[in-house]
Amino acid sequence: MKQKIFRVSLGLIFTVTIVGCNSDNNTSSDKGGASATYNVTAIDGYLNGAEVWLDLNNNFLLEPNEPSAISGAGGIATLDVTGVDDPSLYPVVVRAIVGQTVDETEGDVTEPFVMSAPAGETAVTPLTTIVHNTMKKDPSLTKDEAAAQLASDLGIESDDVLGDFITGDGKPKAAYAAEQIVSMGALPETADELAKAADQTSTESSKFELVVTAVNQDIKEILDTVSDSQTVEEIKQDLATIPPPTAPIDSDGDGIPDSIDAFDQDPTEWVDNDQDNLGDNEDDPYLNDSDNDSYSNDVDRFPNDATEWFDDDNDGLGDNEDDPYLNDSDNDSYANDVDRFPNDSTEWEDNDNDGLGDNEDDQSPNDTDNDTIANDTDNCTSVANQDQADFDRDGLGDVCDDNLDLTWSVTNWNDATWQ
């Protein structure tokens, strides 16, 4: 059954308080130690007639071997935990049943909903449900970290997120937030939907997250207008005079407000994480593939071009029709294996091996030392020497000549001035 978002009723706030087996006030056993009980309190206003169970296998569903009970006055359910070494090691789930469950503050429950609390908590509320869901999706988070995250989203104190927000003077801002979460239809209607909401592979997971985010934003806008410097009673009075958040438009009836629904005319789709204009549910065969070319964005060099995915020569052009020169990084029509300058489209040859291309970058082709004197007339081809100085007249430039001592040769003899 699809959940109905943003219900008009404001009375649905329920807490399930789970008291550990080691608590003297909430755990009991007979004289022989053969049986033990574990008290749990359901709150949204205290819920009388709700189904409560200890989730031994952490799947949110009620199994035949799991301790369960129906809550009574004050929302308290007493679970028979005989044989369970430590009940506080397991989550608790509460199901509000239409026609059976009564909110002791607001009256009969008119819409079904399911809540949970992480292991060790003594209260199960709409707030503990979100904390539990956050922890399931991100196991690296501690309970306190998940609670602090929700507190920030709602604009309430972290210490007010977990526990019974009705008992004693109460925690009015937390109570108001929990009330709105239920009345605005953010909670799943069935245990199966609650399980899917915590499963990252399920479409219900993104749906739950979207709805909760939208609801929390609306709640925070209201709570931010109420000063924490007031007394508890003054805060309660202020909240009582504030109109509840306006029910948003949901054109396709999928439970997602149009303002956050990527497909507000399609009840089967609501999110498009890879921005390919296909919903992430049934209609999108390639999640995390923006151009739907079957290559994941993680490996697709062209994630927004369905005609290209690889670029083996790293030239910025795909290896398919867009690249006329495969294995030609600079696209100069010379393949990398013969191009002396594979990343310079203006050069490809270097006949004099001087490190400069034979085109515009090399002003003196066949001039190895780049001194503007060609190799065939340069008296020192390995070291630049524009002056071509040759002191000993041996045909080897001075910069290359290890021996500058005058050596008599025919040249020396002919140049001599003596007779």
Image (cartoon, rainbow, N blue to C red):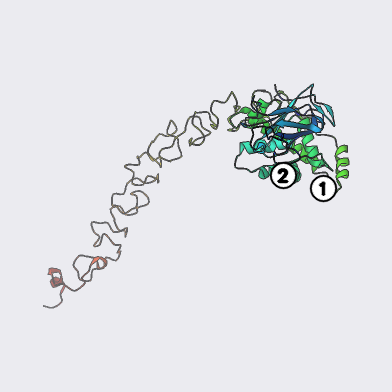
Of 189 and 62, nearer the camera is 62
Q: Which mark is residue 152?
A: 2
Of marks 2 and 1, which one's residue comes earlier in the chain?
Answer: 2
Residue at the far left in the pictured view: 419
Estimate how packed mark 1 is, as few (under 14), some (14 to 19) or many (20 or more) residues with alpha carbons within 10 Å. Answer: some
Disc 1 marks which residue?
228
Q: Is residue 244 above or below residue 108?
A: below
Question: Answer yes or no: do the residues labelled 2 and 1 have beta carbons within 8 Å?
Answer: no
Instruction: Compare residues 226 and 20 and report the one nearer the observer.
Output: 20
Residue sitting at x 70%, y 28%: 68
What is the quadrant of residue 164 in the picture? top right
Assign a secondary structure to mark 2: helix
Q: Tag 2: Cα neighbours inside 10 Å, few (<14), some, or many (≥20)?
A: few
Residue 368 location (% of width, % of height): 29, 56
Q: Amino acid at mark 1?
A: Asp
Return the x and y of residue 139 as percentages of the image width and height. 60, 39
